[in-house]
Image: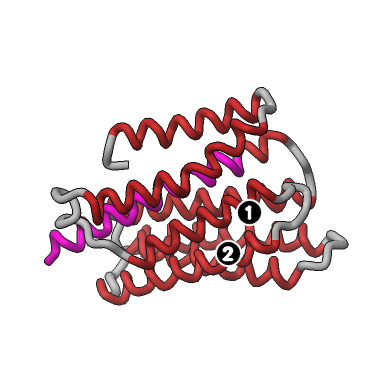
Amino acid sequence: MRCKIIEITFFSLIGLLVIGFIFNIEFLRKIPLLSVGLLSAFAYLKVTKFNKNERYKHSFNILFFIVLCLMYFSDILLSTLSVNMPNFPKFYVNILVYLILIYMVSKQILERGYQKMNFIIKISLIITLILFGYIFYYVNEMIKSTPMDFYNLFLFYGLILFSLSSIVIFNFTQKPNKSNINLSVAVTCIILSDVFYIINLLYLKIPLFIVIIGVTNLLTYYFLFHYEMNRNKIKLVKQ
């Protein structure tokens, strides 16, 4: 994605996804989901391993590469199983992805050390956390009202996702740089994708929700990739 060809290919996949939903072409809907993970992994390896000029500027992070691989596996599960039934394997894989991201961001915060925040930033952090908390409370109440027997899994899943979003927002308020902006947007895309997936599954089935799930899923890769690239770049500059 540091290459124009890869950038164009990535956004072309989003275009294919939207066209596939508009004209109800199953093949075009599945191509982006089955391609974006490979594209992201290739782009990451190209920058950190295969490009002689770039690999000295960006170190290879095995945990981030595992995140990309797990996300791709989650996409395969999403594309092969029905959207009208709970996709339990996908949730288990996503939980593992979120736990790894929590570890990565926590480590980043600990290495940097706590930074004092002014009053406005503190208020903004509190308001954001309250907003995320309300979203998860609303989804939790929706799940409780359904006869499906997977409440405990969804509750655990929601707590992990809320923990991830909280630590990412805290990380951003501590260091509002380009890297952490990309991470915050990526996690916002994750939240939107998961929330609309659950709403579509349990409450209201609208084709637009499927489009939102697909697009936010693709954008998650894009912003996570740029988070890691800018994070590595920033770290190397500090050294």
Q: Residue furthest top?
A: 23
Q: Residue at x 40, y 52 (%)?
A: 224
- CA neighbours of label 2 inside 10 A, class few (<14), some (14 to 19), many (20+): some
Which image quadrant for residue 151?
bottom right
**What residue sits right under mark 2 in the picture?**
93
Q: Toward the viewer: 69 or 130?
A: 69
Q: Are marks 1 and 2 in contact (CB under 8 Å)?
A: yes
Q: Would you name the residue on which mark 1 appears?
A: 77
Q: Main secondary structure of the magenta part?
A: helix
Q: Quadrant of residue 39?
A: top left
Residue displayed at 52% across by 62% down? 129
> Which stretch did the figure color magenta?
212-239
Q: Residue at x 62, y 67 (%)?
A: 92
Asked if residue 12 shows in the view, the reply is: yes
Q: Residue type at mark 1?
A: Leu
- The quadrant the C terminus occupies is bottom left
